[in-house]
Amino acid sequence: MKNRSNHYCRQLAGAVTLAGAASTRLFLFCLALMAPPALAEEPCRDLGIQTVNWKSPNSTQTGVLVLHAQPGCVAAELGVRAGEVITGFNGHPVANNYDLEALAGNRAAHLAFSISLKNAEGQARTLERAEFPFRTVDEAVHDEHAGVSSEWLSWLAWAGLFLLLSLTLTPVMGWILMNHNRDIAIGGAAAGVYDEFKKGGRKYVEAGIQGALMSLAMVLAVGLIGPFGLVYNLYQPLTAMMTDADQKMCCVEDEGKYAVSEDGRWLAMVKPTPDRYFGLGDKIVRAPYVAALADLKAGRFVAWNNSTDKRWLGIEASADSGLRDVYFDSASHRPYASWDNGFGTPIEPKNQQILTDQSGAAPGLEERYRMTSDAIGEFVFSETGTSTSFVLHPGESYDKWWLSADGRVLALATRPYQPDEKYDGWFKRTYHTLRNFILDDWTVTFWDVGGQRKLATYKGYGYDKARWEDGGFLDASLDGRRWIMIRDNGFALAFDLTGKIGPAYAAGRQTGPLYRTQNANSKIPLHSEAGTSAATLEMLASLVGLYPSEILEAYPEIDTALRAALGQSYRPLMDMITVEAPAKATPDGGLTYTACKSHACPDGFLVVYISPNLKVSALLFHDEQAISLPEAPRQGEVDPDGWSNIALYTQTAYPPTMPRALFDVALNDLAVRNPALDEDHTTFSSRFWIVGALP
């Protein structure tokens, strides 16, 4: 068994939450999602940089510090180097990540731009890139579906059985009903009266009439089994063959749960073992659940070894947990049954894997278009690559719509008119009820979202009403090229749009915006210092228990190092922070202490770490409303991640490292709750600033 994971989202790498009361509640420190991976297309066509806000400790100069330039991406190819500061974009000044995001975050990746940089020596330069061709994306190769499945011919075998019953049993029951109807009625009436007498009732006349009618109805029903079954088993495959689907497949169970593989070729099904066995498709299986895997390309079910027949495989529930869902794992591309306790059971036997290695074969999720509105019969989309919005107006009526996972194909579906008992008269209700019972016609129209054109319209008869209500009427492959419909009569219908969709233009994650929103955070390595002298360690040990003001007064070199780390913030902090805690030793032999504002420690406090080499680093936790520093974001600026502000000070801004001992001290504070972070790295929001001198 395996834990079922989210197949389309990256897992949370670590979160550290530092909480305290400031008016209501102050969130002071949080580590969030891992940085996004490299783009799928090489070379990637966004900037491909990790950045953080930066401010000089000796002046008011600010900018966006480049922590890392990903090889093969735009920035690295232009010559942007880690440690440089971005000061402008397309001729506009850049003071922080928000400026850069406003100028480049919504800019299409293929457009021309210029970027201004400054290095540690203060030398400025401007790099330019010409417009990049907006070329098409290589589509995954899809095999065409096979013709109509021959499985539906099994309906004719049942039709032959009912034909035999019609020729034999029906005439016999008809002769009995015509010549012995009085005897049957009398016998049924007598049985009804006797049953009423046994129950102690007194309604003998009513019971006799009901018994007579029921006896006659039973004889009539037995006689009609043959004709009715014959019509049913000829009509159902006929209506299935009359649909416009590209692939018709028989026979599935409408009571089961389904999943379509990422490439749209495989259909996996799981259902409980039925209690009764009558009609087409019911199989007697001695297992709590039965499963099947259908090859939509070949139009046939696969054959499992050691199963009760060629189609079904029994699987056991996980720890007596009920069936929740069926899904294809995005990593292995293999089908699983998901149970209520969160675990999944593979549908394939371990010793017989029907699916070949699908690594790299199934298309990944690339969200090319995102729907933002579906009001008044119009669909508003935005292209994820360029952030351009457009309106798709189908101009046709529909009852429900479905959108493929990548947002490229929109499906509009209609079903027969459903009579309303409140507003429709009895004649209209009767007409539509009978019509729906016989036809149950539906239509599905597929639209190319990017091309804003109709791809195809399919019509058919019969549909699964339960799946219409819960949204499972249609299901699609990730790229929207293949769609599947499960009918309530046992047929699966596949719609193949492979030959109807033109080449896709680069969009979505293939290109991305020119500059990604920095809510995904930047990694800050943690490090430990070594190589100090025994005399320094002894001196630091002697300072344990002293107050910070005593330490800074007795050792000016430590005060000088703290001034260098805090820069222009040194004086405002020293004037504001008046409550001190005695210094403590750290496991590496260093020293640490905390200080805060009088009567307002939850609003902001300073954590200072003195390394064994007498290097000073500090973490300042503060509430923007309580402490206004030069490094604080502009007043009225919107916080995109909802966190409070944290300023990270180091002696040198690049590489922007944090001593592990300093971070451990912050974690050991009583305000920190539920710490969890990567063993080697921590991440910071773009809201945070690094204050330090460039190397």
Image (cartoon, grey):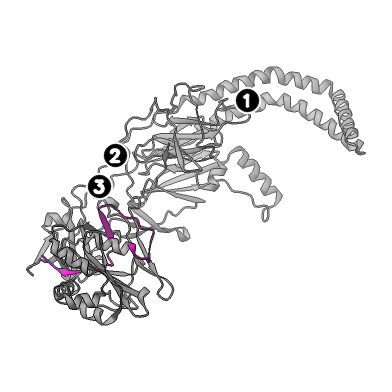
Q: Residue at x 44, y 73 (%)?
A: 24
Asked whether 524 or 616 is in front, the reply is 616
Work out whether 491 lies above or below 373: above
> Which disc, if any, is residue 623?
none
Q: Amino acid at mark 1?
A: Leu
Say which quarter of the image contains residue 667: bottom left
For label 2, the residue is 140
Check disc 3 and report the residue beneath it. 40
Kind of residue indicated by mark 2: Ala
State whether residue 664 is above or below residue 499.
Answer: below
On the question of residue 108 being in view, the answer is: no
| Residue 230: assigned label | 1
Image quadrant containing the N terminus: top left
Query: In whole angstroms, how far apart are the C-alphas of marks 1 and 2?
Result: 45 Å
Q: Which residues are magenta?
A: 668-695
Q: What is the secondary structure assignment of the residue under circle 2? A: loop
Whole-percent x, y for residue 349 in the image: 42, 27
Where residue 325 appears, as percent x and y from the top left, is 49, 41
